[in-house]
Image (cartoon, helix red, strand yellow):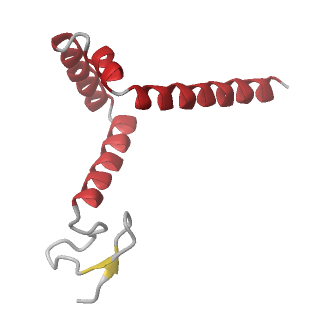
Amino acid sequence: MEQIPCLYCGGFFDPSPRHKNQTACQKEKCQKAKKALWQRHKIKTDPVYAANQKSSQQQWIKSNPGYWKRYREKNPEKAERNRIAQAMRNRKARWASEVTKM
């Protein structure tokens, strides 16, 4: 069987003969990207799955109070990077809403 390109890293790999539609190589990074893409799609298309994910996340938040505050204190550079990125997202959203009003 000939090698095919991985959709995530672009490298070539030997596909498994058991999986005819294989799109990702076996690298951990590519497998995680594949799973993340699947989860985003599943959340958009399956309301039951989305509700279960939200419920699970809320339970985790309740059992780990103050986690994000401690995380931001331990990682100030990441917190600052997020503040800048959020300001850019806010500006972009504001600009988009102004354009649609025109």
Count of labels in the image: 0
| Residue 64 percent location from the top left of the image | 18, 15
The residue sitting at 28% across, 57% down in the picture is: 29
Query: Residue furthest toward the bottom?
Result: 1
Q: Which quarter of the figure has residue 12?
A: bottom left
The residue sitting at 19% across, 19% down in the picture is: 60
- Compared with 46, 102 (above or below) is above
Q: Is residue 79 left or right of residue 13?
A: right
| Residue 19 percent location from the top left of the image | 19, 71
- The N terminus, quarter of image: bottom left
- Compared with 43, 71 (above or below) is above
The residue sitting at 26% across, 69% down in the picture is: 25
Foreground of the two, 62 or 87:
87
- The C terminus, quarter of image: top right
Foreground of the two, 14 or 64:
64
| Residue 43 percent location from the top left of the image | 34, 35
| Residue 8 percent location from the top left of the image | 37, 63
